């Protein structure tokens, strides 16, 4: 697992909807509705379909706001 969620943040910075498993730093970075259980192929498939169908749009997900993401990262690093 990617420990800090940096890859997810880089993806979000490009305007790309990002999904991730509930492990490592990604679970702290992404909104809950964009996470799936690691190893659960059916759940992953469902999230991919949701992205393809346009369910997750960057502008619609408040958790992508730069201030919120930075705050979450600072909370992670301070632990």
Image: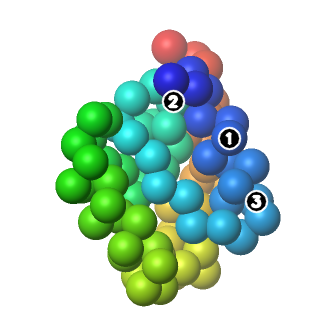
Q: Is 57 above or below relative to 79?
A: below
User: Mark 3: few, some, or many residues within 10 Å (few <14, many ≥20)?
Assistant: some
Task: Locate residue 69 relative to residue 53 in the image: left or right.
Answer: right
Which badge, 3 or 2, comes first in the chain's sequence? Answer: 3
Residue closer to the observer: 32 or 73: 32
Distance (Cα) linking label 3 and label 1: 10 Å
Any part of residue 76 in sight: no
Residue closer to the observer: 46 or 60: 46
User: Mark 2: few, some, or many residues within 10 Å (few <14, many ≥20)?
Assistant: many
* Label 2 secondary element: loop
Q: Is 47 above or below relative to 32?
A: below
User: Mark 1: few, some, or many residues within 10 Å (few <14, many ≥20)?
Assistant: some
The residue drawn where x is 51% and y is 69% is: 62
Write down the residue under mark 3: 13
Task: Locate residue 5 relative to residue 54 in the image: left or right.
Answer: right
Nearer the camera: disc 2 or disc 1: 1
Q: Is 46 above or below relative to 32?
A: below
The residue drawn where x is 76% and y is 59% is: 13
Residue 2 screen position, x and y as percent: 58, 26
Distance (Cα) linking label 3 and label 2: 16 Å
The residue drawn where x is 31% and y is 35% is: 38
Task: Locate residue 65 relative to residue 45 in the image: left or right.
Answer: right
Q: Is 53 above or below relative to 32?
A: below
Which badge, 3 or 1, comes first in the chain's sequence? Answer: 1
Write down the residue under mark 2: 25
- Mark 3 and 2 residues: CB-CB less than 8 Å, in contact? no
Residue 7 screen position, x and y as percent: 68, 41
* Label 1 secondary element: helix
Count up the numbered dots.
3
Which badge, 2 or 1, comes first in the chain's sequence? Answer: 1
Write down the residue under mark 1: 7
């Amino acid at each position: 697992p990617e420990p800090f969620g940096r890859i997810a943040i880089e993806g979000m910075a490009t305007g790309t909807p990002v999904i991730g498993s509930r492990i490592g730093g990604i679970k702290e970075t992404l909104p809950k509705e964009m996470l799936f259980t690691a190893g659960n192929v059916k759940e992953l498939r469902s999230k991919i379909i949701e992205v393809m169908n346009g369910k997750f749009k960057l502008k619609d997900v408040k958790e992508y706001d730069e201030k919120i993401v930075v705050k979450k990262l600072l909370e992670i690093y301070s632990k």
